[in-house]
Image (cartoon, grey):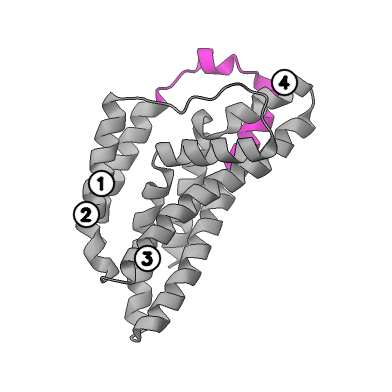
Amino acid sequence: MTTSWAMLIALGAFHGINPGMGWLFAVALGMQERRRGAVLRALVPLGAGHALAVAGAVAATLAIGAVIPIGRLRWPLASVLVSFGALRLFRHRHVRWAGMRVSMRGLTLWSFLMATAHGAGLMVVPVFVGMSMADEGVHTHHMAAIGAGAGTALLATGLHAVGYLAVTAFIAVLVFEKLGVGILRRAWINLDVIWAAALMATGALTLLL
């Protein structure tokens, strides 16, 4: 179980590295207002939106698991992850937004849409499935297993959010105060390709659960 917790935090950290997941937006808001407080204030809606996207994917898995044994989701889940990763490898569509001046509610919605469109929640689901399969082995009663699954879902979402917010905050403050957004031109990495590969690798690893 400890390994699963570490994986959830690591996945959150990986999502936090991607500028498309929010830290670049936080830096832009800080530059508009010319103060670190704006950067830090943006972290709350960014974290909430990201957590909602992950919670939605995990909740959907939990609902399906109430009908069929969650272990049977491995092959369908692996197929979805590999297919989605391949789709993102060749088509890099991003959520369009009207502008950088947004309310906290709007930033939460933006973060939710970006995380959903990138499959951030899907990437977390295999770890949750592995944790739920371990719970099923402990709780032989179906309702008890469902209750344990709900607790596991909250834990998985929370741990992932911790990793995401820690890395997002660190990079946003570092870029805002020290590096500047020019670092994106000097040290450009195609994160879309890395992200797509991560989705497909997660799908392949799902079959090993």
Q: Secondary structure at mark 2?
A: helix
Pick the quarter of the image with the N terminus.
bottom left
Q: Is residue 169 magenta?
A: yes
Q: Tell me the crowding category of disc 1: few under 14, some 14 to 19, or many 20 or more residues within 10 angstroms, Cα based.
A: some
Q: Which mark is residue 76?
A: 2
Say if mark 2 contacts mark 1, CB within 8 Å.
yes
Residue 79 in picture, x, y percent from top left: 21, 48
Q: Which residue is mark 4?
A: 31
Which of the two residues, 198 or 44, is positioned nearer the viewer here?
44
Q: Please tell me which of labels 3 and 4 falls first in the chain.
A: 4
Note whether residue 208 is visible: no
Quarter assignment of residue 82: top left
Note whether residue 22 is visible: yes
Quarter assignment of residue 127: bottom left
Pick the quarter of the image with the C terminus.
bottom left
Q: Which residue is mark 3?
A: 63
Q: In the image, what residue type sits under mark 4? A: Met
Quarter assignment of residue 133: bottom left
Q: Which residue is mark 1?
A: 80
Say if mark 4 contacts mark 1, CB within 8 Å.
no
Part of the protein shown in magenta: 166-190
Residue 204 in picture, x, y percent from top left: 23, 48
Q: Nearer the viewer, mark 3 or mark 1?
A: 3
Residue 118 in picture, x, y percent from top left: 40, 37
Q: Is residue 186 magenta?
A: yes
Give the residue at x 64% y 42%: 45
Q: Nearer the viewer, mark 2 or mark 4?
A: 2
**Above or below, comparing residue 125 to residue 133 in the picture:** above
Q: In the image, what residue type sits under mark 3? A: Ala
Give the residue at x 57% y 33%: 22
